[in-house]
Every structure is written in structure tokens, then in C-alpha cells.
Amino acid sequence: GCDVRLESPAVARRHLEIACLADGGWHARDLNSRNGTRLGDVPLSDRDFVLLYPGDVLQLAGILLRVVRFVVTDADGWD
């Protein structure tokens, strides 16, 4: 795993989870944060993961994260 720290008082310490799928795709879910997470205009749930695609924009309390193309080559490294 990897933690990313965002310097904003509006972003919770554990705000969002992004995980890699076995097929190389990625998905995300909110971690029941007070200010929530949105994928575009859609609020994310803490119960269900949503698939992420290049070009998607995640919104965390005013911070925007754009999804870019990513490739995992193996468990030890990134391409």
C-alpha cells in the first residue's frame, strides 16, 4: 500500500481509498469522510468501489485529482 498526504484541513486523514485490481484496472471509494469524495459530479459511497478511467477527476473537499494512464508491471515496480 501507499499513503498520500494532502495538505488541507478539509481532507480527512483517511478520506479515500484507491486500489489496483487483478486485471490492472483501478477503483476508488470514499472512506466515510465528512466532506465526501466525488467522481465528476457523482458522490462516492463508502460501501461501493467505482472504476477509474484515464481522464476521470476525483474531488476531495475542493482538491481535484485527475486520473492518468498507469501501468503496473509487477508487484515490485512500476512501468
Image (spheres, helix red, strand yellow):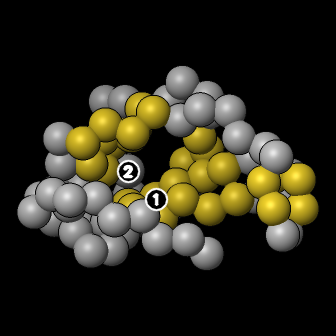
Count the marks: 2
Q: Give whichever of 27, 79 is nearer the camera.
A: 79
Q: Secondary structure at mark 2?
A: loop
Residue of label 1: 29
Mark 1 nearby-residue class (10 Å; few <14, some 14–19, many ≥20): many
Residue 12 location in percent, x, y?
A: 22, 69
Furthest residue in direction top, as rendered: 55
The three-letter code of the residue at mark 1 reads Arg
| Residue 79 higher or lower than 69, as above or below | below
Q: Secondary structure at mark 1?
A: strand
CB atoms of marks 1 and 2 within 8 Å: yes
Q: Give whichever of 73, 17 is nearer the camera.
A: 73
> In the displayed structure, does residue 42 sit left or right of residue 48?
left
Q: Quadrant of residue 58?
A: top left
The tag on residue 44 is: 2
Residue 33 location in percent, x, y?
A: 24, 66
The residue located at (24%, 55%) in the rendering is: 36
